[in-house]
């Protein structure tokens, strides 16, 4: 086994361990801070599974889904009567946590690939950052 293969294997094992710990923490966070109202869960879980699965298989598709689902999911709790006086995690935060878990899982199985779509990824990331800045400035 060459030195590069050892580093790659160590990186994959480290990322797999971190992903497992993160998934467990995400599960307990979800149980603790997301309201377990059946209608709300029925609307929220498909978004979370799609964000996770799309990102786990292809980062570009997952990022694109995250960008378009973020404004939709942000108002979801208010449709189900979950108002600010009820302690709960913002739905957009939970969506981001599912997206990030998919990103970590993608890093385990796909690894680093340098391809022609890197320019598209950079533009999508810049768009995500600017969208986050705009939405957070409106929130503050």
Image (spheres, helix red, strand yellow):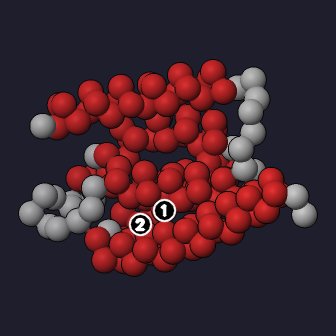
Q: Whole-percent x and y of residue 99?
A: 51, 52
Q: Which mark is residue 60?
A: none
Q: Is residue 48 left or right of residue 102?
A: left
Q: Whole-percent x and y of residue 20?
A: 57, 73
Q: Whole-percent x and y of residue 56?
A: 65, 53
Residue visible at 68% across and 69% down in the picture: 13
Q: Is residue 30 left or right of residue 59?
A: left
Name the quadrant of the N terminus: bottom right
User: Element under label 1?
Assistant: helix
Residues marked 2 and 1 touching at CB (< 8 Å): yes
- Circle 1 crowding by C-alpha within 10 Å: few under 14, some 14–19, many from 20: few
Reading the image, the residue beneath label 2 is: 41
Specify the farthest residue to the front. 3
Asked if residue 111 can be seen in this view, the reply is yes
Q: Whole-percent x and y of residue 118?
A: 66, 27
Reading the image, the residue beneath label 1 is: 45
Name the quadrant of the C terminus: top left
Residue 43 position (above or below residue 140): below
Residue visible at 23% across and 36% down in the picture: 136
Residue 132 position (above or below residue 119): below
Residue 20 position (above or below residue 97): below
The CA span between labels 2 and 1 is 6 Å
Count the numbered circles shown.
2
Q: Quadrant of residue 19?
A: bottom right
Between 86 and 19, the one lying in front of the other is 19
Q: Quadrant of residue 62?
A: top right
Specify the farthest residue to the left. 85
- Circle 2 crowding by C-alpha within 10 Å: few under 14, some 14–19, many from 20: some
Residue visible at 9% across and 63% down in the picture: 85
Q: Is residue 40 left or right of residue 78?
A: right
User: Element under label 2?
Assistant: helix
């Amino acid at each position: 086994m060459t030195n590069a293969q050892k580093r790659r294997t160590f990186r994959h094992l480290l990322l797999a361990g971190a992903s497992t710990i993160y998934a467990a923490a995400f599960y307990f966070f979800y149980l603790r801070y997301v309201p377990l109202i059946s209608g709300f869960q029925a609307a929220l879980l498909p978004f979370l599974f799609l964000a996770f699965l799309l990102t786990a298989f292809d980062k570009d598709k997952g990022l694109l889904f995250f960008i378009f689902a973020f404004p939709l999911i942000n108002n979801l709790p208010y449709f189900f009567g979950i108002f600010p006086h009820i302690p709960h995690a913002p739905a957009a935060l939970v969506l981001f946590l599912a997206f990030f878990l998919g990103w970590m899982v993608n890093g385990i199985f796909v690894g680093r690939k340098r391809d022609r779509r890197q320019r598209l990824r950079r533009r999508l990331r810049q768009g995500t950052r600017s969208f986050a800045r705009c939405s957070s400035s409106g929130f503050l």
